[in-house]
Image (cartoon, rainbow, N blue to C red):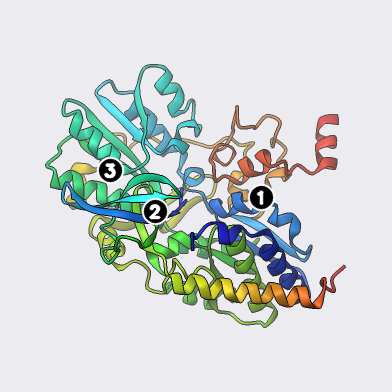
Amino acid sequence: MCLGVPGKIAEIYEKGGLKMAKVDFGGIFREACLDYVPEARVGDYCVIHVGFAISLLSEQEARETLDLLKEISNLETELGPGTAP
Amino acid sequence: MKYVTEYRDAALVKGVIEQIRRTVTRPWTMMEICGGQTHAIVRHGLDQLLPQEIELVHGPGCPVCVTPLELIDKALAIAARPDVIFCSYGDMLRVPGSGRDLFSVKAQGADVRVVYSPLDAVQIAQQNPEKEVVFFAIGFETTAPPNVMSVLQAGRLGLKNYSILVSHVRVPPAVAAILSSGDNRVQGFLLAGHVCAVMGYWEYPALAEKFNVPMVVTGFEPLDIANGILQTVQLLEAHKVEVGNAYSRAVRLAGNRPAQATIQRVFMECDRKWRGIGLIPMSGWCLRPEFDAFNAEKRFEVEAITADESPLCIAGQILQGLKKPNQCSAFGTVCNPEHPLGATMVSSEGACAAYYRYGRVELKDQVGRYER
């Protein structure tokens, strides 16, 4: 139910008084409501849940997390397998 | 950055799990709240990759599973009316009520439709002015902004034939209920990422402190979950009671303010029964009285319907992390996806469904069960 899928905003328009968008999910396009992320622009990525954008994804935060986890993983490779049995 | 493939990198996930292995010094039990995370954990085999010191127990974060039986019966009563088009998320159709489910009502001729978004239900109401269109508004905090927007949009369009049957629940009261239980075994929580995307996580430090349990906001991809577990283990091992955020690309401390404001405008807090668990005070949301015109329970006078659960089903204990699905005597035998006793066996987020689908039946248990 709380499934949220990241999608890229391809086009923004108004429909029935709501701010709507055409959203690109890796080549599949669906409509989503942007009323809860009014700051979203074309090209931004959002988490889409049941046809609504609920969160704007932060590329900077995403990169920082990935860099940190890569560092942890590389550290592991250099040190060899863990000490646990 | 595609925000999907990067978080499914097997080598990275294994690296993070190796770091968990290095960090852990003693057994810890942690709970993932969200049923979506339960399915990701079992589907990707994270439960089997983790060091044996880490036990994951599965939480109540499956709205389909916790929607009380009597509300399903109310939905069935409304859906069976010839003047009604009943719209629902697909997951609800196979959930057993006292006697039948929405699928069988549909098979008997009722107009029951699966929708992707509540705005689809509003559109159906617009296109069918001679019919009553009812949307089954279930969900946790994540789904509240879409569901309340459908009410506001129906009002804006002047629709008189749209109403919602509400069964909304909230995570913090459930966390408090689990931690207050004398049987509680949970020492750390993986908080539900998308619930926190909407609500933020500012409510949780007080809970963490009160019950002395660290919590980490966690996403849904395998790397996100491994990262959430790593951060939880680090806090537990350091005896730190804090609330961390392992899903910072989508979740901010304050959450989504416009969504919270819209929820507050339409919903108010109320007591709510959780299927298999019982009543948790102020754990739900219902429509404010000024939205009575959109309240299906009032429109169709089904408020008096009550119901009781199957005594065989232990879904309530599973949803509180007290038991695992394969510890149930009915699991895989009298209860299976074709003939479910409880909603946890049919929901795409139910723990029983995950264990059944991905084969988490302990072999010796299975042999024993079939021999009996």
Which residue is depicted at the point 41% across and 74% down? B253
Does mark 1 fall on the same chain as mark 2? Answer: no
Q: Amino acid at mark 1?
A: Val
Q: Check disc 3: other Cα within 10 Å, few if <14, some if 14-19, many if 20+.
A: many
Q: Quadrant of residue B338?
A: top right
Chain hosting mark 1:
B
Q: Is residue B120 found left or right of B278 in the rendered image?
A: left
Q: Nearer the viewer, mark 3 or mark 2?
A: 2
The span from disc 3 to disc 2 (Cα, nearest Å) is 14 Å
Q: Is residue B264 found left or right of B314 in the rendered image?
A: left
- B338 in relation to B172, above or below: above
Q: Please, what secondary structure does the residue beneath circle 1 have?
A: helix
Residue receiving disc 3: B119
Of B251 and B371, the residue lying toward us? B251
Total residue callouts: 3
Residue receiving disc 1: B42
Q: Amino acid at mark 3?
A: Leu
Does mark 1 fall on the same chain as mark 3? Answer: yes
Q: Is residue B53 visible?
A: yes
Sequence-earlier tag: 3 or 1? 1
The picture places residue A66, in percent across and down from the top left corner, at 57, 71
Chain hosting mark 2:
A
Mark carried by residue A48? 2
Q: Nearer the viewer, mark 2 or mark 1?
A: 2
Q: Amino acid at mark 2?
A: Ile
Q: Residue furthest right?
A: A85
Which residue is depicted at the point 41% across and 32% down? B73
